[in-house]
Image (spheres, rainbow, N blue to C red):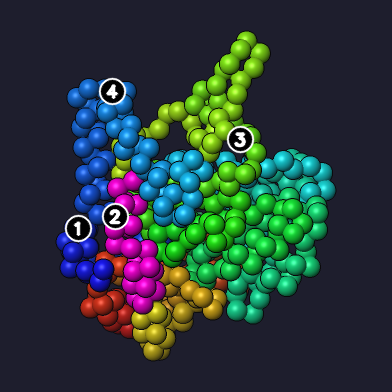
Amino acid sequence: MPFDLDRVRQDTPGCWDKVFLDSAGSSLPPTVVVDAAVSHLRREAEVGGYRAANERLADLAAVKSSIGTLINAPASSIALSDSATRSWTDFFYAVPLGPGDRILISEVEYASNGIAALQRAARAGARVETIPSDSSGQVDLEALDRMLDDRVAIVSLVHAPTNGGLLNPVREVSDLAHRVGALVLLDACQSVGQVVVDVAELQVDALSVTGRKWLRGPRGTGFLYIDPALDLAPATLDLHSAQWSTETEFRVADDASRFEFWECDVAARLALGAAVDYLLDIGQATVRTEIADRATYLRDALQSVPNATVRDLGTLQSGIVSFTVDGVEPTDVRDRLATADITVTVSHRSSTLLDMSHRGLQAVVRASPHYFVSYPELDRFVDAISAL
Ligand SMILES: *Cc1c(COP(=O)(O)O)cnc(C)c1O
């Protein structure tokens, strides 16, 4: 099906009066997503949350099926959560770790992951080590190969970093890590929803995603995929993730729901399902192409603005365009664009400490166009940068 820009813009009232370039931060949800959440909240107010949820059991189960279709995984391998970080840490804190074990992280590691790795390493007597990047900026596979041994418990890889357009190779990392029995945890927070992510192809052991970014879902949603072959017990359990079977025993759920708690925002989950269905309806390959074309167009255009420097790394790139403007602080760029109804964000050094320190950057401006952004809007943005 050809891409219908008019239709997706019609479905996205938030884009009618502004140039919205922050889908890597918190995107504009389509109307069906908002309606799914609001109508369920209304129903809860009418009949109470339990009955309202019971009326939607099939739809709630379908949320996981839709996510399964999205990443090519069985619904039973999906655990819904309230953020990508929740999902990432739920898995990470479940991986056994002892003295002398090693945790490998990528140079573009997201701060929350890095902090969790340091905390666990300190508690367990383990070590955190950074896999260097190669000259293109992507994870250095040869260096990784040299670093791996049987003390490596887990390799954390960020698919698409928060601070730029890099896309890391995943399958190659999985293959290398699995040779020494290490687990691969993929932070797919910035990739699912904009690039095709197929867990059967990528062979990762687990993957974490948020709802509000490229998936265009509501805030406070996310999910974890965990390889069904893995027998890992979560660090925390409740009466949904486990069953109290006798006075002295409990049984942990055998599917990915062992990584969920019972209580949840049902309206938000239904809305997340609507967002995934909306994406599947447009088609993942179409979405990937439309976003990549816009990002390439922006990078090319910014390259011809004399005072602007594009900061994106990598040979394969995502829809995130990072740049700086000579003589104008990134936060000032953001604020001045905001007065012209152009929304971008700033990614600070503290979010991706290793990479930004390595490159001597304090902050970059981040423009992340989704498929609903029109080309005339991209031109307006570039003109505004030129005029700074
Ligand atoms: C935004 C982001 C996260 C965190 O997502 P939350 O839903 O806020 O927890 C993790 N990793 C990357 C690369 C991100 O950009």
Q: Is mark 3 on a helix, strand or loop?
A: loop
Which quarter of the image is occupied by the N terminus?
bottom left
From the viewer's perspective, is the residue at label 2 or at label 3 nearer? 2
Q: Mark 2 points at which residue?
A: 278
According to the image, label 1 marks what residue? 11
Give the residue pinned by disc 4.
51
Determine the image quadrant of residue 351: bottom right
Using a 10 Å C-alpha cutoff, classify the residue at mark 3 as few (fewer than 14 neighbours), some (14 to 19) or many (20 or more).
Answer: some
> Relative to the observer, which residue lies in front, 148 or 380?
148
Between disc 1 and disc 2, whose residue precedes? 1
Ligand 1 within 8 Å of disc 2? The answer is no
For the residue marked with disc 1, what is the amino acid? Asp
Q: Which residue is drawn at 39% across and 85% down?
A: 300
Q: How crowded is mark 2: few (under 14 residues within 10 Å), some or many (20 or more)?
A: some
* Dot 4 or dot 2, earlier in sequence: 4
Q: Which of marks 3 and 1 is nearer the N terminus?
A: 1
Which circle, 1 or 2, is nearer the viewer?
Answer: 2
Q: How far apart are marks 2 and 3 (CA)?
A: 31 Å
Give the percent coordinates (x, y) of residue 326.
45, 81
Residue for badge 3? 234
Rendered view: 74 above or below 294: above
Q: Does the stretch in magenta take in 274?
A: yes
> Real-space Cα distance between discs 4 and 1?
30 Å
Q: In the rendered structure, which segment of residues is drawn in magenta?
A: 273-294
